[in-house]
Image: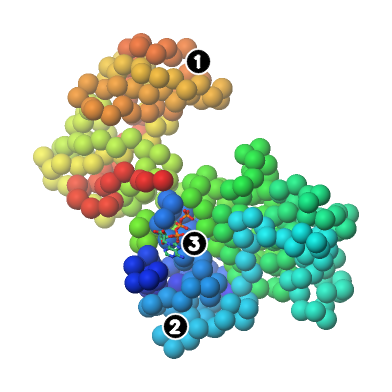
Amino acid sequence: MSELQVRKIVAAYDGSPVLHGVSFVVPSGAFAAVLGPSGSGKSTLLRVIAGLHRPLEGAIVAAGRVLAGPRVDVPPQRRRIGLVPQDAALFPHLDVRANIAYGLPRRERDSARVSELLDLVGLRGLEHRMPGELSGGQRHRVALGRALAPEPNLVLLDEPFSALDASLRGEVRAQVSQVLRSTRTTAVLVTHDQDEALSMADRVIVLADGRLEQDGSPSEVYSQPRSPWVARFVGGAVTLHGTWRDGVAECALGTIAARMAVGHSARNGDAVELVVRPEHLELGGPHGTPALVRRVQYFGHDAVVTLDLPGLEAPIDARVIGGADVRPDAEVAVRPRQPALAFSRSPGPASEAPRD
Ligand SMILES: Nc1ncnc2c1ncn2[C@@H]1O[C@H](COP(=O)(O)OP(=O)(O)OP(=O)(O)O)[C@@H](O)[C@H]1O
């Protein structure tokens, strides 16, 4: 069992707090993504887990062993944690085999274990290439092989795909998750890319301003966001002010079906904040609210249509299948296809716009 427990971690730089009591558990063998905008404290959290930054409060427990706590600070090299850094950080003067073998104790560097790892990360045949002769994706696989070599309890991946071309990224993400799943390694990925978090992880841990905003499966975080902020940050959302009345909401989109978010409630006449996914807005049809098309971004499989609605200062985006025939300045009718998610209105960071 190599469960990771992050317990009420408080961390600071020069007295300025950066993490404010962050807690979550990654079950043994699970793949978690810590997702948050720039400056939310993701790298600091990873450094705390790896033993590169000492927390002021809280504890880190991996595989049942306390690695950091009030009187404990296990040095990084004794934590049994593998790290895959952002830039792969390979030794440029060592070939693929030697880079992977570097992760093993000296006496095991010539062992069959290195060949096993080359097979695991799909680099058999390239073992004598130098890092400069590899693609970005292959370099990451070497870094993963090196991190997995000593059979760590936990692998940490720090934005490992951000430097890759978009065309390569999807493939490398799939290869890395396949290797981690096949070895049942507990892993934590840090990313600001919501697609990466949703597509790779079993658990998504959303951080904002050093606080945990939500911890759940990708579909929970997407379909039951805990706040309008999470909805906007994970997947994008149209947010509207509305008034709750008998299971529907009155807002700039007219009177629309709505359901209250988990943990929220409203009485008739209460102000609510409504969240609608852009892909749940449909154009055309007899019952929609009239809107003016401001811009169309056509992507082939779908299009993002930016609309001005009467009474709304900011435009809203609808993501529609096709969309080739929608023209700027046209008047269209817009309507949500699914009930909006309603949040009781409360001030605070959860209702501010995401920053990135
Ligand atoms: N070595 C440091 N000294 C002082 N402040 C730091 C240091 N490293 C990070 N910070 C600050 O701590 C906060 C969190 O930074 P951190 O790098 O953990 O965020 P992040 O979510 O990983 O951001 P990014 O996605 O941009 O890497 C930021 O305000 C940052 O300026």
Local secondary structure at mark 2: strand
Residue at label 2?
69
Q: Does the Cβ of the disc 1 residue fall within 8 Å of ligand 1?
A: no
Few, some or many C-alpha atoms within 10 Å of disc 2 (few <14, some 14-19, many ≥20)?
A: some
Q: Nearer the viewer, mark 2 or mark 1?
A: 2
How far is the residue under mark 2 from the one under mark 1? 58 Å
Q: Is residue 27 above or below residue 159?
A: below
Query: Which callout, 3 or 1, points at the residue further toward the start of the chain?
Result: 3
Judged from this view, the residue extending furthest toward the left is: 269
- The amino acid type, in three-letter code, at marker 3 is Ser
- The amino acid type, in three-letter code, at marker 1 is Ala
Q: Is residue 308 above or below residue 263?
A: above
Residue at label 3?
43
Q: Position of residue 161 (x, y in %)?
A: 61, 50
Tag on residue 324? Answer: 1
Within the displayed image, which quadrant is ligand 1 positioned in?
A: bottom left
Q: Residue at x 32, y 12 (%)?
A: 331
Q: Does the Cβ of the disc 3 residue fall within 8 Å of ligand 1?
A: yes
Q: Residue at x 36, y 11 (%)?
A: 330
- Compare residues 75 and 320 and report the one nearer the observer: 75
Q: Residue at x 65, y 66 (%)?
A: 184
